[in-house]
Image (cartoon, rainbow, N blue to C red):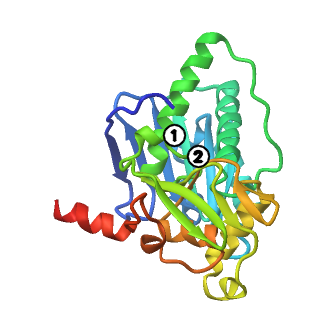
Amino acid sequence: MSLLKPFSLRIFVADGDPDGLRLVERSNWVGKAIVFPRALLPKIKQRAELNQTGVYLLLGPREDGEGEMLYIGEGDPVRPRLESHYAQKDFWNRAVCFVAAPGQLNKAHVQFLEANLVRLAKAAKRLPLDNGNHPAEPSLSEADCADMQVFLENMLGMLPVLGIHAFEQAAPMAAAVAQTVLTCRGKGVTASGYEATQGFVVRSGSQAVGASVPSMQQHVRGMFDLREELIGNGVLQREGDHFLYAQDYVFSSPFTAAAVVLGRSANGRIEWKDAGGRTLKALQELEART
């Protein structure tokens, strides 16, 4: 994504219910997001926005109940695709559609957006995808490709504000709010990371223990499942008796980051320390006083 710039969003709560239908517009942009829970689709499917060409995200709980999964699709228009998923796809409970005024998007445009969203989600590995295949990127003219790249960047900027972080990769170290490198050690492994606006970033090349303690699955099941998922999708790769991080990875908190590294429940504010041995907790307390 290009250099971050300030922007504003206008959120219209169409039926007065904050959890209901929301129309989200970004300043100086032709696109619009339509956000709604699955239960509302029969009531809102006649809306003009859903009869436009667009790209959409479906989100809902995983089968094991731990965290969310994601489906990315496109439609010309989106309404028939959403109706099909309403009848046939079980997991999702909320949807976000991105459309534009009539004539602004065509089938090739939204295929381009869909292909790039799938690519970014697979690279970030933040949520498992329900998509079976990786769609091919269509051939676009140079001008259309440039326009859709801007459309994509605007979407990606809006999604975290809407609570969707599936496409975010770790920000470069220079872009992090706090650039102090912290270290977590235990059981012969060492990991390094830092705090960022997205969460807590564990850096590529960090180590994680080769096996979690038996109690981790019982007492911190969500962290255990996340660790197993990262092993399964290649973020954590086996090297001898431990694992290595194959990429920078953003965790929701330093607690989860430390637990995955150490293979047990861990207080991340105590386990992560700077070069002088000061804990993250001590650093935060110091910053609060200055």
Residue 221 location (% of width, % of height): 65, 81
Identify the residue under disc 2.
Answer: 167
Task: Left or right? Give the position of 242 relative to 57.
Answer: right
Towards the viewer: 188 or 118: 188
Q: CA distance from mark 2 to mark 1?
A: 7 Å
83 or 235: which is nearer to us?
A: 235
Visible residue check, residue 199? no
Crowding near pointer 1: few (<14 within 10 Å), some, many (20+)? some
Residue that numbered label 1 is attached to:
156
Name the spot of residue 112 as percent of width and height, x first. 68, 29
Depth order, front residue of 284/163: 284
Residue 139: which quarter of the image?
top right
> Cβ–Cβ below 8 Å for labels 2 and 1?
yes
Q: Position of residue 194 (x, y in %)?
A: 46, 54
> Is residue 20 visible to us here?
yes
Residue 147 vs residue 228: left or right?
left
Taking the spot 66% from the left edge, 83% from the top edge, the residue there is 216
Q: Residue 144 in the image: x percent, y percent? A: 61, 16
Name which quarter of the figure residue 186 lies in: bottom right
- In this rendered view, identify the residue nearer to me: 182 or 144: 182
Kindly identify the residue that appears in the image at 62 percent across and 34 percent down.
53
The residue most toward the front is 276
Amino acid residing under circle 2 = Phe
Residue 140 in the image: above or below residue 288: above
Name the element at disc 1: helix
SS for callout 2: loop
Residue 276 falls in image quadrant: bottom left
Quadrant of the image containing the C terminus: bottom left
Label 2 environment density (alpha carbons within 10 Å; few <14, some 14–19, many ≥20)? some
Q: Left or right of 195: which side holds 148?
A: right
Indicate the amino acid at tag 1.
Leu
